[in-house]
Image (tube, rainbow, N blue to C red):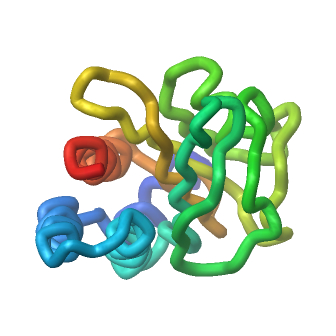
Amino acid sequence: MSSLVENELVRKDMAILQADMVIREVKEVAAAGSSREKILHAAAEGIRKAGPPYTSVYCYMLDTDGVELVLEAFAGRPTEHTKIKVGNGVCGMAVALGLDQNVPDVSAFSGYIACNLYTLSELVVLIRRTDGSIIGQIDIDSDHPDPFTSQEHASVRLVADALGALL
């Protein structure tokens, strides 16, 4: 069996994020007057609860100077990377380029900043205000190689867009 076919078979066994459920939860938390950190935690936990390939979900927000990403909430494995300079690693490059990043094999990414030894792939989706300005990102680590389909990316994008409108 080819590796492409094997990968598609693995993907069928993995979750497809139900963005509408996560967005509903995030909006409920926001409507209760919760802090930004609690709103972001609801998003991270909601995404992670979908199961594989969502191993760990981190929500980083840009500092007031726009030069550093600061970890504000996460669900999954803790990380020592609580601050990441714009331009460094997958997260920093996403902001520097203004583009979401889907990295199917983190070992092939030059300048990769490893949160742990188990992460094989990463998806970073930018959080933007309604005017398009970047305010943060959802960073997803997976213990599976190349698991993030365009459908998964689009689902996380919906959550990020909801956060951008709420925060």
Instruction: Determine the residue positioned at 12% across, 70% down.
Output: 31
Where residue 59 appears, as percent x and y from the top left, is 51, 58
Which quadrant does the N terminus fall into?
A: bottom right
Locate residue 48: give its quadrant. bottom left
Confirm whether residue 151 shows in the render: no
- Above or below, 165 relative to 14: above
Nearest to the observer: residue 57 or residue 17: 57
Where residue 123 appears, as percent x and y from the top left, is 54, 47
Where residue 156 appears, as percent x and y from the top left, is 33, 51
Where residue 124 appears, as percent x and y from the top left, is 53, 44
Give left or right: position of 22 versus 137: left
Instruction: Determine the residue positioned at 34% across, 74% down.
Output: 42
- Above or below, 114 relative to 143: above
Locate residue 68: give its quadrant. top right
- Above or below, 156 relative to 27: above
Instruction: Determine the residue positioned at 45% across, 37% down.
Output: 135
Locate residue 15: give its quadrant. bottom left
Give left or right: position of 62 versus 131: right
Instruction: Determine the residue positioned at 15% across, 66% down.
Output: 27
